[in-house]
């Protein structure tokens, strides 16, 4: 069994409009400790991440404490919206979820984001079979991965997690076949549950 924990980054500083260099806020730096705590007993073998600063910073506390290194993977980066700042992000996002091929002149469609993330995920599965892997990710990129395996996951689901940062989704694979998806709200993990997550079982 290969277990992959996609970690959506903690709260970023939106005052910085440079998508790649946007850091975490003070709250985000505190909240990343929830990720460290959650991963502490998961026997993580490998840590990968989007190269974006906020994704790397979210995993930094964990890798320092548990003496891992972060390998950045370009394909796991967030969707490119455009070369300019978008004011009505909600309207733009809804348009993209309604039409997976919709994009702005210098941006990416959700289909393009999904294709590169799934291709990178499949390569990880080929290279690291039967390992426990943590991957630093983003809200939209991660949502398109979920949608690939569960086409019912759409705009409203994305809206429900839009401000949930950090957020973790565990994918379990037998070979390259998905067995289970577990969505984990690290802010509300039950003391009586291993993860407090929501399960979708794909076992055949």
Image (cartoon, grey):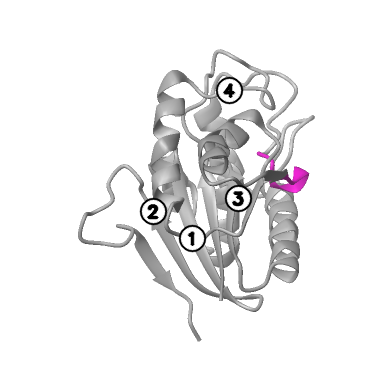
Tag of residue 156: none
Residue 109 visible (yes or no) = yes
| Magenta stretch, residue numbers | 72-78
Cα gap from disc 3 to disc 1, whole angstroms: 10 Å
Q: How many neighbours does mark 4 have within 10 angstroms: few (below 14), some (14-19), or many (20 or more)?
A: many
Left or right, 118 with reference to 26: right
Residue 111 on image: x %, y %: 70, 52
Numbered disc 4: secondary structure: loop
Image coords of residue 67 (percent x, y): 59, 45
| Of pointers 4 and 2, the one earlier in the residue sequence | 4
**Relative to 8, 190 lies left or right:** left
87 relative position to 183: left or right: right
Can residue 163 be seen from the camera position used here?
no
User: Residue 170's mark?
Assistant: 1
Location of residue 44 by image quarter: bottom right
Considering depth in this image, is 150 or 42 the residue closer to the camera?
42
Q: Marks 1 and 4, how far apart in space?
A: 24 Å
- Residue 46 to residue 91: above or below: below
- Return the mark for residue 23: 4
Q: What residue is pinned by disc 2?
A: 184
**Image quadrant in which the N terminus is located:** bottom right
159 part of magenta stretch: no
Q: Position of residue 34 (x, y in %)?
A: 39, 41
Query: In the figure, 24 relative to 34: above or below?
Result: above
- Is 119 placed left or right of 6 in the picture? right
Q: Disc 4 to disc 2, how far (Cα)?
A: 23 Å
Asked if disc 2 and disc 1 are in contact, CB closer than 8 Å, the reply is: yes
Q: Which mark is residue 135?
A: 3
How far apart are the two marked residues, 2 and 1, measured between alpha carbons?
A: 8 Å
Mark 1, residues whose alpha carbon is within 10 Å: few (<14), some, or many (≥20)? some
Mark 3 surroundings: few (<14), some (14-19) or many (≥20) residues within 10 A = many
Mark positioned earlier in the residue sequence (2 or 3): 3
């Amino acid at each position: 069994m290969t277990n992959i924990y996609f970690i959506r980054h903690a709260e970023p500083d939106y005052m910085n409009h440079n998508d790649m260099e946007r850091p975490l806020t003070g709250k985000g730096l505190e909240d990343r400790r929830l990720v460290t705590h959650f991963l502490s007993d998961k026997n993580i073998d490998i840590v990968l991440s989007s190269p974006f600063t906020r994704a790397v910073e979210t995993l930094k506390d964990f890798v320092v404490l548990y003496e891992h290194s972060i390998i950045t993977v370009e394909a796991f980066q967030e969707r490119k919206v455009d070369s300019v700042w978008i004011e009505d992000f909600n309207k733009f996002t809804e348009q993209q979820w309604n039409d997976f091929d919709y994009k702005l002149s210098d941006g990416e469609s959700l289909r393009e984001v999904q294709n590169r993330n799934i291709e990178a995920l499949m390569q990880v599965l080929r290279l690291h079979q039967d390992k426990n892997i943590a991957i630093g990710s983003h809200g939209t990129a991660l949502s398109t991965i979920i949608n690939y395996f569960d086409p019912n996951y759409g705009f409203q689901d994305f809206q429900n997690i839009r401000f949930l940062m950090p957020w973790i989704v565990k994918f379990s694979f037998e070979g390259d076949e998905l067995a289970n998806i577990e969505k984990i709200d690290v802010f509300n993990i039950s003391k009586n549950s291993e993860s407090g997550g929501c399960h979708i079982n794909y076992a055949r």
